[in-house]
Amino acid sequence: MKVQVVGGGPAGLYLAILLRKADPAIEVQVLERNAPDATFGWGVVFSEDALGALRDADHETYVAITDTFARWDRVDIRYRDRLLQSRGHSFSAIARKRLLEILQQRSFALGVELAFGCEAKAVPAGADLVVGADGVNSTVRRAHEPEFGTRVEPEGCKYVWFGTDLVFDAFTFVFRETEHGLFQVHAYPFDERTSTFIVECPEATWRRAGLHELDEDESLAFCERLFARDLEGHELFSNRSIWLDFPKVTNASWHHGQTVLVGDAAHTAHFSIGSGTKLAMEDAIALRDALVRRAWDVEAALVDYELERRPVVERTQQAASESAAYFTRVAGYTHLEPIQFAFNLLTRSGRISHASLTVRDPAFTRTLDAWFTGASARVAPPPVFAPLQLRELQLGNRIVARADAEAVSGAGLVLSGFVAVSDAGRISPDTPTIDEWTPAHRPVILQLGHAGRRGACLPRAVGVDLPLPAGWELVSASPLPYGPYSRSPRELDEDGMATIRDAFVAGTHRAAEVGVDVLELDFAHGYLLASFLSPLTNRRADMYGSERLRYPLELLTAVRRVWEGPLAVRLSVTDWAGGGLAVDDGVAIARALVEHGCDLVHTVAGQTVHDDRPEYRRSFLTGLSDRVRVGARVPTLVGGHLTTLDDANTIVGAGRADLCILDLPSSDVERKVRAPSEPAERQIAQT
């Protein structure tokens, strides 16, 4: 069997090593366009879990790599005038040049043919398997780009990659405020003499600072001046260090015929979570394993390889994208106190939580908990059990339960579910109206709404948005049916708007009479008030079409006049549909709601139209809550399949929401044991 690997980086060299180890009869050739000692970049980071896979795949390479590692278990965060430290984060790093030397030497020892200074201008012919390991700008991938379904998009901030002769003793984040905006640094040691020093900032900040007009040397000098205090008299080094946009690479397929992609040719993950080389070398392990498992049947092995690796890579890319996005808007978090800012930073990608950080560094979470609850004691309850003040109402904790959930008794607030302002505003015949509804639990948040064009449906136990055979008249912002089986609503005129506004005001009086603690107006999920907000559902030609917020704000203002308690709005922050509201639009709406008296935003998403493209996963609404809380400076309530107290502690502790809806699964940890139908002695005798 003949294998040609295009690209002599870590992925290509490591795959060549593993293939020759698996079967020395295989002919493996690596084509690399650069000289053997040419490399761009500085250090390569490995987490502890990555090292286990390398140890098992090729112990000799593992020993050679780990013998030269710089190691640390601490993250330092320099924010404002404070240094915050978190321990228990086991990482190692090695100079990229040294890593390539080790892999080249091991390849030579195993009989791999290495051809340097050999640029493949097309996919090599004559091999049983061609591996594209030639990085972000892969020649192999470009040759079959339509078949691979390649997408390359910029992600995150502008960044520049330097080295420095200051040897840091931890992974170090530095945040520096300037008149141009916020700059941040990711720095870590990779040998006994040198550290990586990455500087990044949003493009707007980069331009205001004039960095787009500076050459390589001038840019380096700017960064040396800016971070002089952190460099402690040391200098920065350049290795073609120019400002770049990080390219996020995805492919619909990683293989085509006898050609397969590995590493950055197949996928990239933003450097802020340090997984690029790890993913590339793990790809090599998975491809080798698939070929061996399938007895060198290339076609079957490539399918196996992709099925195994794609879910792992996509999860990592998701975490990396969330981390990259975090750094584009990190300036929005500078109002947070240092300990919360640090916790927010550490948990940004979702891979560290309050519970896992407690295992790694109990002193850090103990400090966070004490600060959050305002306790002077060394031991304090975690963030979710801290009280919350909303106007004159004080909630005992940050947990919100649905009215039909088992956890109602321990919750700080109970969510009523949809209650209609009138019979015509019901979703289905079993939807309660405000005139007949009374709270079963306290404190309660009443979700008051009008179904609009999603009304007059069969009960949802039968199906979602299935119209009644003979329902009532529907109204909406525009005469557009909700789904393919829905009836067309009547466009609401100004008299109708006034009637519904008065119904909400009357419902507010009723809510006060029955002792509602928090009143929530439903502006979400395609119901009546939400239909005014979205361009997908509001096609009006009058002022309520040109100013889509006009009617919802009029109604909010009318309710605010007669309601003295906490007032919430349930808001679809994004429509999850082309041409609809995007997240930035949702944040702008939230700001307007706050200006008109809203005290709390309950963040949800989608369902504005029946054919939206939801992004459901665990905690899928947390990022939206974070954006609204930071962008509108308003407390938020969030759900989105939060199933553990750890989810809630992480979200609340990091300042991503103030209240969390917990969907706890039923517990069968303890149950009564039924007595046997006959004595045990007799059962044993019969057996």
Image (spheres, grey):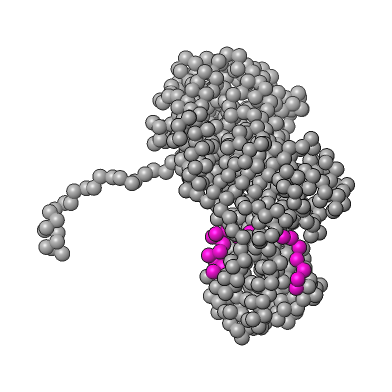
Which residue is rendered at x = 74% and y = 26% of the image?
Answer: 547
Q: Residue 11, position in %: x, y?
A: 66, 68
From the viewer's side, name the closer residue of 36 and 136. 36
Work out which quarter of the rendered image holds the N terminus and state it. bottom right
**Is residue 363 in sight in this rendering?**
yes
Residue 555 on the magenta span:
no
Q: Is residue 686 above or below residue 117?
A: above
Q: Is residue 30 above or below residue 566?
A: below
Q: Residue 238, position in %: x, y?
A: 79, 57
Q: Is residue 63 above or below residue 526?
A: below
Q: Residue 653, position in %: x, y?
A: 54, 37
Q: Is residue 306 above or below residue 544?
A: below
**Residue segment shown in magenta:** 36-55
Residue 53 on the magenta span:
yes
From the viewer's side, name the closer residue of 381 and 72. 72
Which residue is rendered at x = 82% and y = 49% of the image?
Answer: 221
Quadrant of res 536: top right
